[in-house]
Image (cartoon, rainbow, N blue to C red):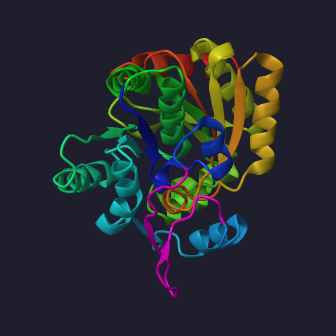
Amino acid sequence: MKDYEIVIDCTCDLNEEVRKQFGIYNDYFHGIIYIPGREDKLSDLSYSDISSDEYYALIKKHAGKVRTAFATFEEFSRVVKPILESDKDIIVVTISSALSGTYNGYLNYAKIILEDYPGARIEVVDSLKYASASGLVAIYAALNKQKGMSLDDNLNSLSAIIPCIHEIGPMDDLFFLAKNGRIAAPKAFFGQLAGVQPVADFTRDGKSMPLGTIKGSKNVDKFCLEYLLKTIKNPEEQVVIVAHSNRLARAKRYKEQLEKALKVKQIIIHEVAQSCAPNIGPGLCVYFYVGDEISLDREKENKLYSELKANL
């Protein structure tokens, strides 16, 4: 069986430590970030060139004006050509095609490059997720590889896992969402006064959409844990990621409350990295995990939201 590597994009949010732990290829595709008044920069998964606090301050200051772009063809080539030249194939995991042009861009890049490598394969996987939820897809790809799965068997396994990956958690900075044009400003203002926080889960077509709002941080935290407990599958075999954007204290609390409630194989706290941060902003704290298959119309998830909210 021909060997292959698992390669991620900068939007998958897995730092060097996590990539090394699971055997994900250490190099990755660096996208481009445009910040008003600064030189364009390559995105980084470790905040080695700017602290996360400083970066989020810039994002908040320039809400809606910090732009990102996926990796150039030259950057894509820089990463994949050494792998192909070592006679290995490649699985590339990208952010959801419903949120970015990355997936289609990399399909085109791969097609061009493979003209020079007859018989080689670059399989681009649309995670239908964002940030470290995309990274979670890559983690399962790496775990499948460790089990000895062929590239094709791995792709089939991922196609079954992807519709089952959930997120649940709040966004507490509604002012940023308003400044970034994602919700109406008056609604954000009154929501903030009332202590309301939206909670979201994925859709089957690769979007992240609110289920609704919960009032009060304690109620939000309780709701998110209960939602996870009602939907997670085989937790003792799972890697759960607690992702946050400038909310480390809350992420630690989410990890602790999950550890007390359930035996999980591993829980990783991960900060949203530079490529996804401008579109998310500060204030996110979510669980990413494998659970029940998400319903096509989210009828099951919406019903569960209503039931759990009524019991708070």
The location of residue 136, given as percent across then percent down, is 54, 35
Left or right position of 188 against 126: right
Work out whether residue 57 or residue 178 is closer to the camera in this orientation and state it.
57
**Visible in this render: residue 129?**
no
Quadrant position of residue 87:
top left
**Residue found at x 37% / y 41%:** 88
The location of residue 8, given as percent across then percent down, is 46, 48
* Quarter of the C terminus within the rendering: top right
The location of residue 25, given as percent across then percent down, is 51, 46
**Visible in this render: residue 24?**
yes
**Residue found at x 52% / y 70%:** 63
Q: Which span is picked out in magenta?
A: 26-47
Secondary structure of the magenta portion, mostly? loop
Q: Is residue 240 above or below residue 238?
A: below
**Residue found at x 61% / y 36%:** 22
Q: Is residue 182 above or below residue 242?
A: below
